[in-house]
Amino acid sequence: MIKHIVMWKLKDQAEGADRAANAREMKRRLDECAQIVPGMLAFEVSLAQPGLEATYDVVLYSEFADKAALAAYAAHPTHQALVPFIGAVREARQCMDYAV
């Protein structure tokens, strides 16, 4: 199994919206990626919450049966369609994939 975790810090303003609005839109678009490929075992998108420590604005936690399922997700048209938006609104990105 491969765990795929990505965190994004968003720009204060981008694409005509503020950080909070872009975080909500990013979550909405990412949520559309849930269950788009066989072998996707878990997919959870969360936003930073007031009162809880967070140095990033959006986090994706996902699990895939194997590297092939992760690669299928990365190449899927639904995922590819959100890449330009994320690129436009993000200030920083951290990612870690690991096998368990």
Image (cartoon, rainbow, N blue to C red):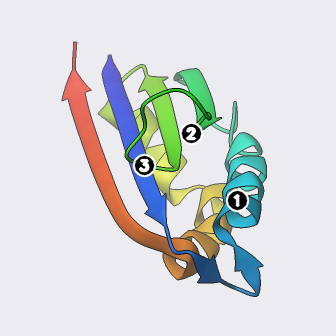
Q: Quadrant of residue 12?
A: bottom right
How far, Cα to Cα, is label 2 from label 1? 10 Å
Question: Counting other residues with Cα less than 10 Å from the Cα at mark 3, is it few (<14), some (14-19), or many (20 or more)?
Answer: some
What residue is pinned by disc 2? Answer: 48
Name the residue at 59% across, 66% down: 80
How far, Cα to Cα, is label 2 from label 3? 7 Å
- Against 74, residue 31 (above or below) is above
What residue is pinned by disc 3? Answer: 56
Residue 5 is situated, as x and y percent measured from the top left of the image, at 37, 36
Residue farthest to the front, as pictured: 51
Q: Nearer the viewer, residue 59 or 80?
A: 59
How far, Cα to Cα, is label 3 from label 1? 12 Å
Q: Quadrant of residue 45?
A: top right
Name the residue at 61% across, 34% down: 49
Name the residue at 66% across, 56% down: 23
- Against 21, residue 98 (above or below) is above
- Against 34, residue 12 (above or below) is below
* Sooner in the amino-acid sequence: mark 3 or mark 1: 1
Name the residue at 70% across, 85% down: 15
Residue 59 is situated, as x and y percent measured from the top left of the image, at 49, 40
Q: Is residue 43 left or right of residue 5?
A: right
